[in-house]
Image (cartoon, rainbow, N blue to C red):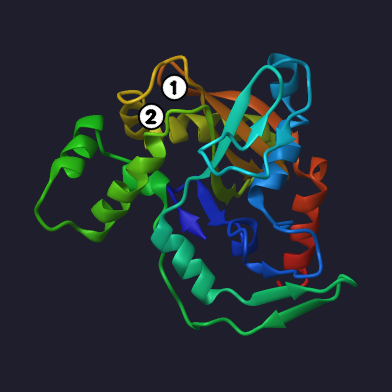
């Protein structure tokens, strides 16, 4: 659990929701447990359909020349994980390994490392930085702190000149489900504070006509935010049960928690 402040607590999704190759499943279809596949499910059950051609999106299996991940006749969209690479490596090392055979039998293997660990998250890393601060980090030749190195590694993601849906692979914990919508509005307000510098940096490199979305899990739904005039606004909320793959991953991980 990570406390962003005294009102927002988040936790990372289990690594099998993040790392495409984490679950060993040699008897199933290739890359079945792939975050891009469950994001496709969510997109196809969202306002993306109504707003972009009124047509389901398809997944592009072959992407050898920088093609978009999904497309329809009207629009294309890329998926990117918005998580520090060092955090992914740490979660890989400290997570139980999982395999699923052709009969859906699940086997658990010991993790590579044990004990407590700490991780970075981009919400915290970009908080209190200005766009100019980020540019200065990018230009700096002197030795950097570890958090600055993570920020530097993230800039390649932000410079992508494509329509992008960034998955922040976290669940925001809802302390009171009776006031979930008010609390969600508060979360969006705080996320704007956390990510303002990153968004401004992105739009110094890309055209304003290129779309930027972020998404995360909250209250058993995926919340999709769209960037409009450097501000994140609520785009849509889609129940997680709209993706069979996501629910399958949830079931697999629930067995071991």
Q: Please provide percent x and percent y for residue 145.
A: 20, 58
**Crowding near pointer 2: few (<14 within 10 Å), some, many (20+)?**
some
Secondary element under disc 1, as helix, strand or loop, is strand
Of residues 71 and 247, which is closer to you in this image?
71
Q: CA distance from mark 1 to mark 2?
A: 8 Å
In the image, which disc is placed on residue 35? none
Q: Report how many numbered discs are placed on residues in the image.
A: 2
To which quarter of the image does residue 135 belong?
A: top left
Query: Is the C-beta separation of discs 1 and 2 under 8 Å?
Result: yes
Residue at image position (36%, 42%) is 156
From this view, report whether residue 11 is shown above or below residue 238: below
Left or right position of 161 against 22: left
Of residues 139 and 132, which is closer to you in this image?
139
Q: Please provide percent x and percent y for residue 55.
A: 78, 21
Q: Please provide percent x and percent y for residue 93.
A: 50, 75
Q: Please provide percent x and percent y for residue 31.
A: 70, 57
To which quarter of the image does residue 230 belong?
A: top left
Left or right position of 216 against 257: left
Secondary element under disc 2, as helix, strand or loop, is helix
Asked whether residue 219 appears in the rendered view, the answer is: no
From this view, report whether residue 176 is shown above or below residue 58: below
Of residues 64 and 203, which is closer to you in this image?
64
Q: Earlier in the sequence, mark 1 or mark 2?
A: 2
Q: In the rendered image, which residue does mark 1 sit on? A: 231
Residue at image position (80%, 57%) is 248
């Amino acid at each position: 659990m990570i406390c962003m402040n005294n009102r927002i607590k988040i936790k990372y999704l289990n690594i099998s929701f993040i790392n495409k190759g984490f679950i060993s499943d040699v008897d199933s279809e290739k890359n079945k447990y792939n975050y891009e596949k469950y994001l496709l499910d969510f997109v196809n059950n969202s306002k993306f359909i109504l707003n972009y051609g009124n047509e389901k999106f398809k997944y592009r299996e072959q992407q050898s020349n920088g093609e978009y991940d999904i497309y329809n006749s009207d629009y294309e969209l890329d998926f990117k994980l918005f998580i520090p690479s060092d955090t992914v490596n740490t979660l890989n090392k400290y997570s139980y390994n999982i395999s699923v055979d052709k009969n859906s039998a699940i086997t658990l293997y010991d993790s590579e490392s044990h004990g407590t660990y700490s991780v970075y998250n981009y919400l915290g890393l970009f908080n209190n930085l200005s766009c100019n601060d980020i540019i200065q980090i990018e230009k700096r030749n002197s030795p950097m702190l570890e958090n600055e190195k993570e920020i530097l590694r993230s800039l390649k993601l932000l410079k992508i000149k494509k329509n992008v849906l960034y998955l922040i692979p976290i669940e925001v914990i809802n302390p009171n489900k009776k006031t979930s919508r008010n609390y969600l509005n508060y979360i969006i307000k705080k996320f704007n504070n956390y990510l303002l510098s990153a968004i401004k940096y992105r739009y110094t490199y890309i055209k304003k006509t290129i779309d930027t979305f972020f998404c995360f899990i909250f209250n058993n739904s995926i919340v999709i935010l769209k960037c409009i005039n450097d501000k994140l606004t609520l785009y849509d909320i889609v129940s997680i049960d709209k993706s069979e793959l996501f629910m399958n991953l949830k079931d697999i991980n629930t067995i071991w928690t």
